[in-house]
Image (cartoon, grey):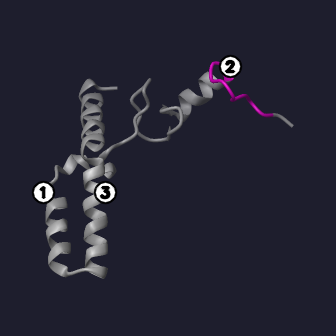
């Protein structure tokens, strides 16, 4: 994996962790305030969400394989690409996985 990609991924994940609770709370307030309370409060909460860093959004984080850096076909549980999951599971190095046969 390119070091630039891995450092960017780490930075994005750190920002998501740092601003996650605040972002979710403001989004919830903006949604419920527009329904139950007044529109001014909902607009203010939406404005505060917009002022948060863009990279603190969870949708900006991309799952990369920790071994190869491949971004597609990555298993979330192992944080490895499908190629590496198959390789290491056939070698028996991933606990709980084995080749099935019937």
Residue hosting label 1: 51
* Residue in view at x 26 percent, y 75 percent: 33
Asked if marks 2 and 3 touch (Cβ < 8 Å), the reply is no
Q: Position of residue 90 (x, y in %)?
A: 68, 23
The numbered disc on residue 92 is 2
The numbered disc on residue 24 is 3
Which quarter of the rendered picture does the N terminus lie within? Answer: top left
The quadrant where residue 62 appears = top left
- Left or right, 1 with respect to 87, comes to left
Q: CA distance from mark 1 to mark 3?
A: 14 Å
Q: Is residue 102 magenta?
A: no
Asked if marks 1 and 2 touch (Cβ < 8 Å), the reply is no
* Residue in view at x 44 percent, y 41 percent: 72
Q: Is residue 54 above or below residue 48?
A: above
Q: Local crowd at mark 3 within 10 Å, few (<14), some, or many (≥20)?
A: few
Q: Which residues are magenta?
A: 90-100
- Pointer 1 or 2: first along the chain: 1
Q: In terms of depth relative to the viewer, which is nearer, 66 or 20?
A: 20
Q: CA distance from mark 1 to mark 2?
A: 48 Å
Q: In terms of depth relative to the viewer, which is nearer, 54 or 38?
A: 38
Which residue appears farthest toward the front when viewing the image? 37
* Residue in view at x 20 percent, y 81 percent: 38
Secondary-structure class at tag 3: helix
- Pointer 2 or 3: first along the chain: 3
């Amino acid at each position: 994996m390119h070091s630039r990609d891995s450092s960017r991924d780490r930075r994005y994940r750190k920002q998501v962790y740092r601003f996650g609770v605040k972002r979710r709370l403001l989004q919830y307030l903006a949604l419920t305030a527009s329904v139950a309370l007044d529109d001014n409060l909902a607009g203010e909460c939406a404005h505060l969400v917009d002022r948060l860093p863009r990279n603190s959004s969870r949708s900006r984080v991309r799952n990369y394989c920790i071994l190869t850096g491949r971004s597609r076909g990555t298993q979330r549980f192992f944080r490895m690409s499908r190629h590496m999951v198959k390789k290491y599971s056939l070698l028996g190095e991933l606990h709980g996985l084995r080749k099935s046969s019937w």
